């Protein structure tokens, strides 16, 4: 979450960022999205921050999806399994 918010601050321009947390018995879902300008057209470069997020989420057996939002902005979505007692 911290890295996604830092990226929004650095890259989104004059925008608002939103954080959504949800959880159930088996999963924690963290979603961070902004209303900013999004990535420049034709930009396929994945920065170190996104790579680091993907590695950390994978370490716990989760999945990470990132990309532009329809209508502008950027979204980071992580789904992380939770241990059962």
Image (spheres, rainbow, N blue to C red):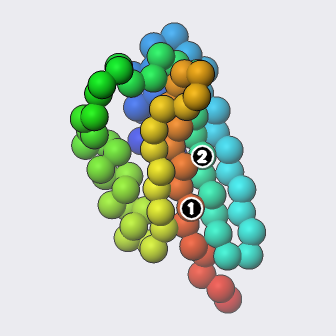
Dot 1 or dot 2: first in sequence order is 2
Q: Quadrant of residue 57?
A: bottom left
Q: With 57 as the anchor, is 30 left or right in this view?
A: right
Q: Residue at x 32, y 42 (%)?
A: 49
Q: Is residue 62 above or below residue 29?
A: below
Per the image, the residue denoted by label 2 is 31
The image's mark for residue 79 is: 1
Total numbered labels placed on residues in the image: 2
Residue 16 in sight in this render: yes
Q: Position of residue 20 (x, y in %)?
A: 68, 44
Q: CA distance from mark 1 to mark 2?
A: 9 Å
- Locate residue 27, reporting x and y percent: 64, 69
Q: Position of residue 1 (x, y in %)?
A: 51, 46
Residue at far right of view: 24
Mark 1 crowdedness (10 Å alpha carbons): few <14, some 14-19, many ≥20: many
Going 71% across and 63% down the picture, which residue do you hit?
Answer: 23
* Residue 42 drawn above or below residue 31: above
Q: Which mark identifies residue 36?
A: none
Q: Is residue 61 above or below residue 2?
A: below
The image position of residue 68, as x and y in percent, is 48, 32
Is 74 placed left or right of 3 in the picture?
A: right
- Given contact means CB atoms under 8 Å apart, are the residues at marks 1 and 2 in contact? no
| Residue at 57% over, 73% down | 81
Instruction: Name the secondary structure under disc 2.
Output: strand
Q: Nearer the viewer, residue 71 or 50?
A: 71
Does dot 1 land on a helix, a strand or a loop?
A: strand
Would residue 2 be seen by someone viewing this image from the given angle? Answer: no
Please tell me how crowded label 2 is: few (under 14), some (14-19), or many (20+) other residues with Cα within 10 Å.
Answer: many
Residue lying at the far top of the rendered structure: 14
Residue sitting farthest toward the bottom: 85
Residue drawn at x 67%, y 89% as measured from the top left: 85
Q: Is residue 75 above or below residue 22?
A: above
């Amino acid at each position: 979450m911290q890295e996604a918010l830092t990226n929004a601050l650095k890259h989104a321009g004059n925008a608002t960022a939103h954080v959504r947390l949800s959880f159930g018995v088996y999963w924690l879902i963290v979603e961070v999205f902004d209303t900013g300008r999004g990535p420049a057209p034709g930009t396929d470069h994945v920065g170190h921050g996104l790579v680091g997020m993907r590695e950390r989420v994978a370490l716990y057996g989760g999945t990470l999806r990132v990309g532009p939002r329809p209508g502008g902005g950027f979204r980071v979505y992580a789904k992380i399994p939770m241990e059962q007692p």
